[in-house]
Amino acid sequence: MDRDYAKPLDVEALAHSIPMSAGHFSRQFRRLFGESPYQYLMTRRIERSMTLLRRGDLTVTEICFAVGFSSMGTFSTRFTEFVGVPPSVYRTQDPPFREGMLPCIAKHLTRPVRNREA
């Protein structure tokens, strides 16, 4: 999922590849990662979109489709749910990290967390 975050999530195929049932896979995934496969995928997509928004060379619509969303409305809703502001507002904000900061710290500071969980 980390590599293919832009592709549709297929829990059945993921479960079949290890082999286990989709239900058991989902339960084990949640136990190990603390979130469902769908939530994990959304987190990866939002992380990538945050990076692309900071880079600034693509439109919000291009980023929406590049990270695997099929609807601007869904993208904007999910982004706002995770980050707290819409993508267009996030783009204009200063990044929460400084030049020269260790990548692991920068990644921690920019990791999206659902507002309800923050």
Image (tube, rainbow, N blue to C red):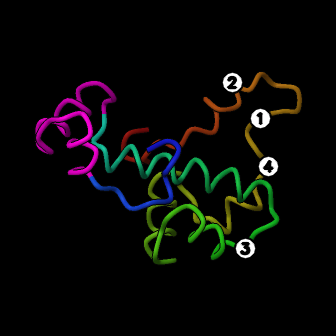
Query: The residue tagged with tag 1: helix, strand or loop?
Result: loop
Q: Earlier in the sequence, mark 1 or mark 3?
A: 3
Give the mark nearest the N terminus, 4 or 2: 4
* Residue hosting label 3: 59
Label 2: which residue? 105
At 73% from the left and 39% from the top, the residue drawn is: 96
Q: Earlier in the sequence, mark 2 or mark 1?
A: 1
Residue shown at the point (72%, 73%) measured from the top left: 59
- Residues at badges 3 and 2 in contact (C-beta under 8 Å)? no
Name the secondary structure under disc 2: helix
Mark 2 and 1 residues: CB-CB less than 8 Å, in contact?
Answer: yes
Whole-percent x and y of residue 104?
67, 23
| Amino acid tagged 4 | Asp
User: What count of labels does the image hold?
Assistant: 4
Q: Is residue 18 above or below residue 4?
A: above
* Magenta highlight range: 11-34
Q: Earlier in the sequence, mark 3 or mark 4?
A: 3
Position of the C terminus, as image quadrant, is top left
Asked if the residues shown at circle 4 and circle 2 are in contact, with their CB atoms under 8 angstroms apart, the answer is no
